[in-house]
Image: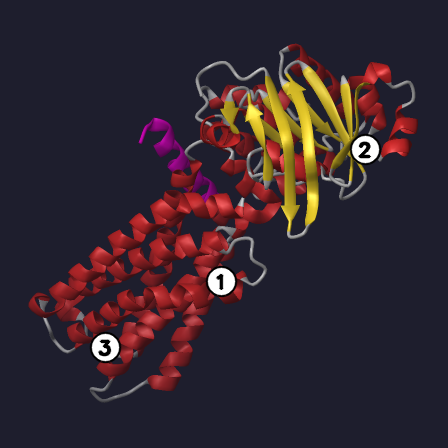
Amino acid sequence: MTERFPPSVSLQGVSRAFGRSFALHRVNLTLSSGTITAIVGNNGAGKSTLLNLLATVDQPTAGEIRYGEHSARSFARRGRHRIGWVSHQTQLYEELTGRENLHFFATMYGLDDVPSRASAWLERVGLADNSVDRPVRTYSRGMKQRLTLARALISNPQLLLLDEPATGLDQQASQLLRELLDDLRQRQRIIILVTHNFDLIDDLADRIVILRRGKIALERSLDDIPDLMQAYRSHA
Amino acid sequence: MNEVFFRQIKTIIAKDLRREWRSREILTTTMAFAVLLMVIFTFGFYRHDESVSLVFPGILWIAIIFTGTLAISRTFQHERHGDCLRALALIPGSQFSLYLAKFIVNLIFMVLFEAALFPLLVVAFSVDISGAVGLHILTLAAGTVGFAALGTLVSAMLVRNELREVLLPIVLYPLLIPLLIAAVTVTSSLLDGAGWSTVGPWIQAMIAMDIAYALLGLVLFRWVLAAVE
């Protein structure tokens, strides 16, 4: 997919059923570039299923997801490499060092100038000390999360799917994450933020979607919600 | 097939070998298992008479298949930890490079343990292979390539299955029967003094099976990866 990345991703009547139960049920949603959309909901509300569908690693049982003019199938074939995904698992090789992990993924993406790119990202996420040459299995949760962010962003993705990206991050790293996401928003990325961290949502998100039992219970601009916690308690 | 594709293959192979060098997980266990099998088979089936040519081919190939299964079952497990398989699935073209790289990695591990196992079994059973060393090596190579090609595919199919350790041999071995029949027949014939005129067609059949298994792996791996991601 050499053309410009679609300015929006839209879900039209999307359902995902597992047997007789629906993880998502008739979801209509439009995600726009330059916008951070926070997805919240209780456990089992369908947040992870929604991310899997957006990442094209799962298919809806009904409805359609469109990436601009592309169907999900066509996008999966041609545009997947433009998705950056921070899932609830690190997606890192524990026996390799932090630097080796970034080199591996950058090379797999066919990027040029791998060593300098990797060094730049390691510095950006605050891992430019000796730890980058230690195996990842020796890292703390927060260090792994920083490296995970670097791994997801090294390919310069246009669609970012972030599942609890602040997990394990200390105050400094949390601030770094905010700066990173703000920068990506200004560079017109489509950013989906699944989190229970309401401070992060309050600071960063433009829109919030509250999922309840696979359905959208509330979808609104954050400017229109005076009390985020109250809205969550009422709708989740 | 472009430069990125070959770089991906090289990168995955280098990553797996580096990982193995640091953990020594696969080679240590397969080597120990191979030696253990050799000891058990030697005590159980050793013969002083000429009937050794009857039992040796079966023992050799059973040892290769059992030990190979142990190695092959591990190569995709590393991708499952931390859900790296999903990260790879988002990378364009990775389904082909991943299959070929894992196939080559499995081949490397198998060649390494076979390099220890085969001479040990030959010595333990006092088998004379001096007349056809080249043909024995060709047979081993043809059997190993087919096993690795099919084993890589089946191992990927089962990567997310909780019963994968049990299911791998159950699914893999029946599919390997034609290759195993040919391998055992060739090894047995070579021990009986047969030459290329006798074993040639069998070895050619094995190479044809290798190509078929590898093509099957390349074609099906895309769907296998889509199903397990």
User: Looking at this view, is B42 or A167 the one in front?
Assistant: A167
Q: Quadrant of residue B46?
A: bottom left
Q: Give residue A196's mark.
A: 2
Pinpoint residue A110: horizontal percent, then vertical percent: 43, 26
Q: Is residue A2 left or right of residue A51?
A: left
| Chain of the residue where label 3 is placed in the rendered structure | B
Q: Quadrant of residue A119?
A: top right
Calculate the distance from the C-alpha at mark 3 to the C-alpha at mark 1.
Answer: 26 Å
* Tag count: 3
- Mark 2: secondary structure: loop
| Chain of the residue where label 1 is placed in the rendered structure | B
Single out the residue that lies furthest toward the top: A186
- Colour basis: secondary structure
Question: In the picture, which quadrant includes the N terminus of chain B?
Answer: top left
> Three-letter amino acid code at disc 3?
Val
> Three-letter amino acid code at disc 2?
His
Q: Nearer the viewer, mark 2 or mark 1?
A: 2
Question: In the picture, which quadrant includes the C terminus of chain B?
Answer: top right
Name the residue: 40% across, 53% down. B152
Q: Which residue is mark 1?
A: B29
Calculate the distance from the C-alpha at mark 2 to the C-alpha at mark 3.
Answer: 68 Å
Q: Which residue is mark 3?
A: B127
Q: Is residue B128 left or right of residue A138?
A: left
Q: Quadrant of residue A173?
A: top right
Q: Are marks 3 and 1 in contact (CB under 8 Å)?
A: no
- Mark 3: secondary structure: loop
Name the residue: 30% across, 54% down. B213
Calculate the distance from the C-alpha at mark 2 to the C-alpha at mark 1.
Answer: 43 Å
Which stretch did the figure color magenta? B1-18
